[in-house]
Image (spheres, coloured by chain):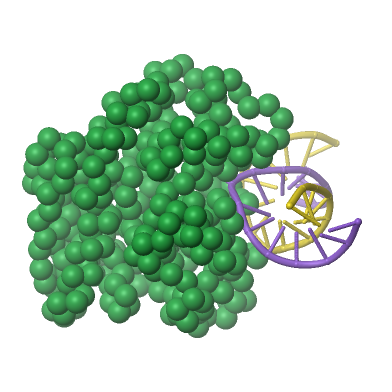
Chain colours: A green, B purple, C yellow
DNA sequence: GCGTCCAGGTCTACC
DNA sequence: GGTAGACCTGGACGC
């Protein structure tokens, strides 16, 4: 059982909606697929550069217009000043309390789809777990398969190689560390987690990360958008789509499923022919129209599909199932 | 039941 | 530089 070692209280530029930020409507997790969310409070876990895992309990003390977030940190031992500072940095990144969305909201007013999404998800931040390795695993398991199998692979990875931490009467399953996965035999990884050819890439990424060949989140953040993407695409198994998911400079990671929806929403007609042909069209549109806010546009639309399809009377298909 | 097809990308060999 | 073809697995579908 971890003990409470420190608390942080954070302010944010309004509007800021804590619940929508940490518990997004489309069902995606904040830090780990096995975190707990009950009545406005979230219990989750983050990994520090020292490989220590801290438990996080977070809730809102304020409102959308007067935001204030309380985060309690749990750990085996008291954190050093450096690790406490790193924990705060991770929390700031994940809560998005330093991001001001007013500019995005002004831009959104010019596009009916975004205007509706902003109305529905007012105050939400697009931010999430700033851990490159977790995002590498996620993006690789999302490739070339149905979403059900992606979830299965993720579940098996966490169940077989992740660690469970217990704090504040909650038990949270954490992602496996790069060190752990680098030491697992590739065949074992393939068989135990149903990864197929992805086992080679995940194992290689774990090894590269241990050897310092993959930049950290903060290092990527300091790079330009293009440099960060180029650095990520040097990881085996990470192409343009995956790099857009991993990078701290969010792009527009449309795939053959989401491109059909975005095409319909943006151009008012269904995409005909091979869906892959629509990907560069939608990407180009997002880059040209929304520039640095394209990641926000993607997150807002993706998390508001049910409402958008109803309000704009557009059929977005039957693939809106809840995520794990 | 059983065989076949193909999917929320990426890599590699070949031209 | 551009582009087929291969890659794991498992659910859907046709027979």
Residue at position x 53%, y 47% from top? A147
- Return the residue nearer the eye: A19 or B4: A19
Taking A195 as reference, is A113 above or below it? above
Give residue A287's position: percent from left, percent from top: 49, 39
Q: Residue at x 10, y 63 (%)?
A: A7
The part of the image, by quadrant, that contains residue A82 is bottom left
Query: Is A216 situated left or right of A288 in this image?
Result: left
Considering depth in this image, is A255 or C7 the residue closer to the camera?
A: A255
Which of the 4 image quadrants contains residue B14? bottom right
Position of A121 relative to C9 (above/below): above
- Whether residue A195 is visible, yes or no, is no
Q: Is residue A175 left or right of residue A229?
A: left
- Where is residue A281 drawn, in percent x and y? 60, 34
**Residue in front for this viewpoint, A118 or A40:** A118
Q: Position of residue A297 (x, y in %)?
A: 40, 36
**Percent from the top left, x then y, of residue A87?**
22, 67
Residue at the spot 44% in from the left edge and 66% down from the top edge: A133
Is A18 drawn above or below residue A315 in the view shown?
A: below
Whether residue A252 is visible here, answered yes or no, is yes
* For residue A204, side relative to residue A63 (left or right): right
Residue at 18% across, 70% down: A85
């Amino acid at each position: 059982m971890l003990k409470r070692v420190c608390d942080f209280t954070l302010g944010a530029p309004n509007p800021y909606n804590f619940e929508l930020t940490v518990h997004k409507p489309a069902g995606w997790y904040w830090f780990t697929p096995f975190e707990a969310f009950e009545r406005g409070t979230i219990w989750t876990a983050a990994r520090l550069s020292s490989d220590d895992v801290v438990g996080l309990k977070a809730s809102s003390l304020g409102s959308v217009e007067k935001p204030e977030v309380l985060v309690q940190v749990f750990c085996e031992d008291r954190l050093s000043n450096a690790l406490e500072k790193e924990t705060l940095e991770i929390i700031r990144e994940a809560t998005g309390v330093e991001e001001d969305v007013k500019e995005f909201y002004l831009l959104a007013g010019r596009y009916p789809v975004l205007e509706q999404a902003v109305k529905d998800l007012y105050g939400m931040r697009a931010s999430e777990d700033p851990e490159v390795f977790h995002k590498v695993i996620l993006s690789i398991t999302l490739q070339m398969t149905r979403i059900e199998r992606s979830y299965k692979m993720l579940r098996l990875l966490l169940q077989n190689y992740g660690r469970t931490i217990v704090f504040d009467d909650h038990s949270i399953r954490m992602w496996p560390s790069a060190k752990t996965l680098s030491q697992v035999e590739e065949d074992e990884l393939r068989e135990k987690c149903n990864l197929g050819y992805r086992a080679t890439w995940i194992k290689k990424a774990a090894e590269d990360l241990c050897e310092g060949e993959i930049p950290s989140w903060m290092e990527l953040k300091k790079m330009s958008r293009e440099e960060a993407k180029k650095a990520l695409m040097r990881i085996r198994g990470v192409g343009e789509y995956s790099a857009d998911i991993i990078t701290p400079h969010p792009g527009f990671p449309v795939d053959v499923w989401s491109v059909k929806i975005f095409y319909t929403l943006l151009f008012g007609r269904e995409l005909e022919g091979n869906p892959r042909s629509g990907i560069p069209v939608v990407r180009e549109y997002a880059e040209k129209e929304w520039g640095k806010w394209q990641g926000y546009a993607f997150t807002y639309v993706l998390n508001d599909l049910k409402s958008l399809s109803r309000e704009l009377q557009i059929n977005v298909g039957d693939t809106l199932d809840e995520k794990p």
